[in-house]
Image: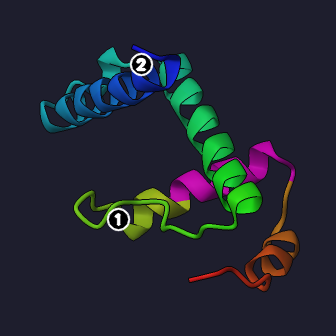
């Protein structure tokens, strides 16, 4: 099995485990560092796929509902961590992307 196959299998396992923790109300069992690692890898991979492959795809699958609150809380904290403000965001939002 290649390392990319391992990555896919690990992503599926992590996704399933995270959903199980969310559904079972056991989020406190997931360490903050684990969440940071998943967000960091996901954000970096997503950015690289969009910018280097020029192949737009939405960040979330249609069957994996993310609420507006969940999205905005994550976005706001990511912006804070990257020292971005809403002006910076407006500039990035105006850039075209392929559909």
Q: Is residue 74 magenta?
A: yes
Q: Quadrant of residue 8?
A: top left
**Residue 48 located left or right of residue 19:** right
Q: Are marks 2 and 1 in contact (CB under 8 Å)?
A: no
For the point 41% across and 60% down, the residue is: 60
Closer-to-camera residue (59/9): 9
Element marked by disc 2: helix
The residue to which callout 1 is attached is 67
Rendering coords of residue 44 (x, y %): 68, 42
Q: Position of residue 47 (x, y in %)?
A: 69, 53
Indicate whether residue 27 is drawn in magenta: no
Compared to residue 29, the image places residue 89 above or below, namely below
Disc 2 crowd rating (10 Å Cα; few below 14, some 14-19, many 20+) is few
- Left of 58 or right of it: where is 13? left
Q: Mark 2 or 1 closer to N-term?
A: 2
Query: Of all residues shown, which one is farthest toward the front?
Result: 1
**Colouring scheme applied when the structure was drawn:** rainbow
Residue 4 appears at what percent x and percent y? 49, 26
Measuring 22% from the left and 24% from the top, which residue is drawn there? 26
Dominant SS type (magenta): helix
Q: Which residue is mark 2?
A: 6
Q: Residue at x 69, y 59 (%)?
A: 53
Q: Position of residue 35 (x, y in %)?
A: 49, 28
Q: Over which residues does the magenta segment extend? A: 73-83
Quadrant placement of the N terminus? top left
Marks 2 and 1 sit apart, C-alpha to C-alpha, by 30 Å
The local secondary structure at tag 1 comes to loop
Number of other residues with Cα within 10 Å of mark 1, as a class: few under 14, some 14 to 19, many 20 or more: few
Q: Is residue 6 above or below residue 21?
A: above
| Residue farthest toward the left in the current orientation of the protein | 24
At 74% across and 79% down in the image, what residue appears?
Answer: 93
Q: Of residues 87 and 92, which is closer to you in this image?
A: 92
């Amino acid at each position: 099995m290649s390392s990319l196959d391992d990555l896919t299998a690990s992503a599926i396992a992590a996704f399933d485990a995270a959903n199980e923790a969310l559904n079972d109300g056991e989020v406190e069992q997931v360490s903050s560092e684990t969440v940071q690692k998943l967000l960091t890898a996901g954000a970096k991979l997503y950015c690289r796929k969009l910018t280097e492959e020029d192949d737009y795809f939405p960040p979330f699958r249609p069957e994996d509902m993310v609420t507006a609150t969940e999205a905005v809380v994550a976005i706001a904290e990511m912006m804070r961590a990257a020292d971005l403000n809403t002006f910076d965001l407006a500039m990035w939002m105006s850039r075209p992307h392929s559909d």
